Image (cartoon, helix red, strand yellow):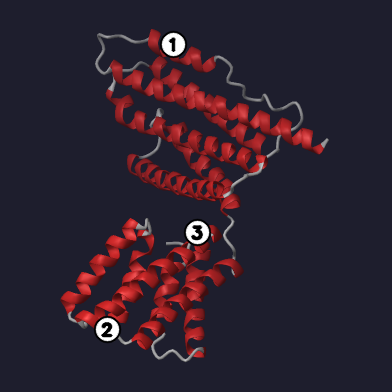
Amino acid sequence: MAFGARILKTGLAVTLALYLSALLHFTSPVGAAIAAIFAMQPSIYRSWRYFLDQIQTSTMGAVLALLGGMLLSNEPIAVGLVCILVIMISMKMNRADTIGLTLVTVISVMEASGQWDFALTRFLLTLTGIISAFIINIAVFPPQPRKQYIQQIENVFGSLSLLLRTAVSHEMKESVFRDEKNALEGSIRSLADKYTLFEEEQKQLRRAKYSQTRQMVVYKNLLASLQKGFEVLEAVERHYFQAERTELTDELFDHHLEQLIKYHETILLKFEDKLKPGATDIAPLGGDNDRFLQAAINGYDAGKNGQLRLSVVAAAIYDYGYQLERLDKVADQINRLSGDEKE
């Protein structure tokens, strides 16, 4: 695993939690350190949301643990029953992501068999850890998911273009291709998680700005284009080489994939505003996508083994091209709006 900002911030949050616990003279600061680990989130919005949610569930858990300790003592079966009750209530409150830390609080409080002062100390320890994580997340390398998203889009496209260029020609070693494809799948999944963060933040805004809504449309189409490209890789791997093909078939598929990759690359350059004026049509797709599908259908021979498999691959490639055309339209609209705003 590569060393990153979140790893560093988790360590700093634990350190701050331990120092604050010592400053507040807590006898056992371990609870604060554990809370800091759980509370470190990938965005400031999620940190704030986790803070509010955890306060609710930890308060509920501490109260139930205090009552359970007073009425049932700290027998193992009693601790287990209270944990079950806390899990059920947390799920009912739609706070499933806070259950882990809440149960730590419950077990710690029940250890004292209903002593309210001990329960209060444990609750304050949890609060100290959550606050420490929130402070570190804001102060040290604050998350910039939008900037990271664009950078990751470029990196993922680089991997996708390499695999698409060698998918039909079958030039890459199978083991290398498989490893690169698995890594690409993980990267696209990570992008989808980041997009989920944006959606969460967008839903919390009562009146989102038009520019923010426009940005969400861009992010969604950028992600969808990469996903469609990955679906082409899946289709090629599952179906293409199991079908009888000619050199003309390989050339048709390989040439169109190369054209789509260049088209995708040009669209990304449009978004980054790196093209010269008048150069935005360097790689227009036009009707080539339709002509490719028509050529693939015309070359279909029911007498050959696995010809339906080629149709599946052709459909995936066509779908990728169609998504790129949609992305291109979004890029043109963004460029026009940006030009209008500058004027």
Q: Which disc is residue 248 wearing?
A: none
Say which amino acid is labelled 2: Glu
What residue lies at 67% left-to-right and 24% top-to-bottom?
281
- In the rendering, at what x and y percent does residue 233 appear? 39, 33
SS for tag 2? loop
Quarter where residue 277 is shown = top right
Left or right placement of residue 210 versus residue 180 in this view: right
Give the mark, 1 or 3, whose residue is nearer the N terminus.
3
Q: Decide: marks 3, 2 in contact (CB < 8 A)?
A: no
The residue identified by callout 1 is 295
Find disc 3 in the rendering and name its residue: 46
What residue do we see at 33% from left, 67% from top?
A: 100
Q: Separation of disc 3 and disc 2 at Cα?
A: 31 Å
Few, some or many residues within 10 Å of mark 1 (<14, 14–19, 20+): some
Q: CA distance from mark 1 to mark 2?
A: 73 Å
Q: Residue flagged by tag 1: what amino acid is it?
A: Ala
Asked which secondary structure carries label 3, the reply is helix
Report if residue 4 is visible in the image: no
Is residue 294 left or right of 330 when viewed as pictured?
A: left
Q: Are marks 1 and 3 in contact (CB under 8 Å)?
A: no
Q: Residues within 10 Å of mark 3 (few under 14, many from 20)?
A: some
The residue that label 2 is drawn on is 111
Mark toward the start of the polypeptide (3 vs 2): 3
Other-residue count near label 2 (Cα within 10 Å), few / some / many at <14 / 14–19 / ≥20: many
> Mark 1 or mark 2, which is nearer to you?
2
Camera-side residue of 144 and 112: 112
Q: Amino acid at mark 3?
A: Arg
Q: Depth check: 232 or 129 in front?
A: 129
